[in-house]
Amino acid sequence: MTAADSALFTPEVLVHPQDPLGFIAFLRRLIDNPLATWPQAVFEEKVHRVPFGKRDLLFVMDPPLVDEVLVAKAASFPKAPIIRRTIGPAVGNDSIFTAEGAAWRWQRRAASPPFRHGTLLSFVPTFGASADATIERLGAVSGATVDMAEAMMETTFDVIVETMLSGRTRFDTRRFGEEISRYFDTVGWIAAYTTLKLPEWLPYPGRRRAMAGNRFLRQEMARVIAERRAEPLAEPDLLDALIAATDPETGRAMTDAELADNLLTFVVAGHETTALALTWALWLIGNAPAVEARLVEEVATVVGEGPVEASHIDGLVYAKQVIQEAMRLYPPAPIIPRIAAEDVMLGDMHISKGTPVYIPVYAVHRHKLIWDNPAAFDPDRFAPDKARQFHRGAYLPFGAGPRICIGAAFAQIEAVAILVTLIRRLRFVPLPDHRPMPTTRLTLRPAGGMPMRVELRQTRISHQTGT
Ligand code: HEM
């Protein structure tokens, strides 16, 4: 480690106890936080086999092999059944996230219009306005401790409703978030049952309540669809694009149930992940004064005192680096599970049909063979002259290949616009004794939230104060 390295903030690694576990203790940990069951080998080796019943489970960390699984041989490695079992109860088994083959392809095409570059840039004022609303809420309690995970969920939820549903629909944001969290909290059980090949109907704590929550979420989506059918929009949004789409093979449009599943997918996938990227970023920045100072300076130079606009985005180079580095250390989607659909070669390894092949993104992003000083928070890794030095299979917050996140560009522009708008006006101070533990609940959440002290900055910004 160099002297420059030692000036960097290095978050303590809390999550990988390597104590030997009996079967029951292992299961308990798997239910509680699957991340805590990953062996140290996934941070040090290129591939790691875990004997599991008749078949091994394979963790793949080597960037060229990761690329082979997700890109070059994507057809041989579809999404693993654990995805359908964990996400299917919330968003159905045939929505854009869970479907495969032709059933997936036409939905992906149908959903693409709102994600074109020009459309994304037209959303920038909305991103800034949602951040401004957050500043108003948080500024009113300046000096208080706030759960920034919750605050960011609220901000990105506003964004998704404003952009994908043209802001026309009103939701009970708090209830929505609670139901999603309630369901996510039970996912450890589903993952454990799937790993043990136990049937889906088996009970577990919180199941009935979580399923009722899922029904509530679906009903909300059904309401939105009925409202839209009754009163179409002049300017089409995501929902209109989905309603208008037809399957080229069958000529049929989506049923209301399919529309509801897809809409829910976009609302859940489209706000929770970006909120977590921002949450972890704010905590890292709060611990790294030099990073914070550079960010504040960049915002002053590039954006100035007015609202953030589409024309600023390309100039916010350091803010983008900060978001990228936050998602390296804390990737909101920490694992990408696949399964071998046939006997297939991976590098020089023969993989037999049915083998689960997992890409542990969280471990790839902290891997000793890939990154210098992997645990340190160093946004300069992503400086424009350095970013191309690593293999594309080494950094995958949004996945890769045909199933890469459809919202990747949306999320990056959104996160940058929200971050710079917030940081210009507010300081986020970590609590001295708080050590956030990353926990996998489909996404990578800080266990118990992210309490931080929020303070208004001294300098006032003219467009918010009217001065
Ligand atoms: C920082 C924010 C985000 C992260 C880290 C993230 C991460 C991911 C990842 C890793 C996948 C691929 C999963 C796999 O291959 O198994 C994915 C898929 C997906 N994401 Fe995102 N996502 C983010 C934001 C968004 C946003 C803003 C939207 C929509 C507005 C969105 C919608 C989707 C959808 C619909 C899919 C499924 C795509 C398909 O299978 O064709 N995501 N996301």
Image (tube, grey):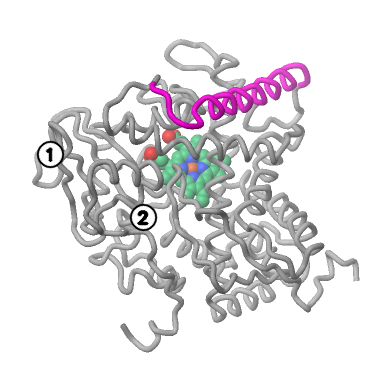
Which residue is drawn at the image coordinates 71% and 61% (left, top)?
308
Residue 216 is one of the magenta-drawn residues: yes
Depicted 355 relative to depicted 144: above or below:
above
Residue 264 is one of the magenta-drawn residues: no
Is 465 placed left or right of 8 in the picture?
right
Is 199 placed left or right of 398 in the picture?
left
- Pointer 2: what residue? 362
Which of the 4 quarters of the picture holds residue 461? Answer: bottom right
Which residue is at the front of the view, 314 or 223? Answer: 223
Depicted 216 relative to depicted 113: above or below:
above
Which residue is at the front of the view, 309 or 221? Answer: 221
Which residue is at the front of the view, 104 or 47? Answer: 47
**Residue 395 on image: x %, y %:** 36, 57
Separation of marks 1 and 2 at Cα, in angstroms = 25 Å
Report if the beta carbon of the residue with label 1 is closer than 8 angstroms to ligand 1: no
Query: Which three-letter amino acid code belongs to the residue tagged 1?
Result: Met
Which residue is drawn at the image coordinates 37% and 25% (left, top)?
100
Q: Which residues are magenta?
A: 202-231
Residue, far bottom = 3
Q: Earlier in the sequence, mark 1 or mark 2?
A: 1
Is 289 placed left or right of 38 in the picture?
right
Report if the beta carbon of the residue with label 2 is closer than 8 angstroms to ligand 1: no
Residue, far right = 467
Task: Quarter of the image for the N terminus: give it.
Answer: bottom left
- Pointer 1: what residue? 345
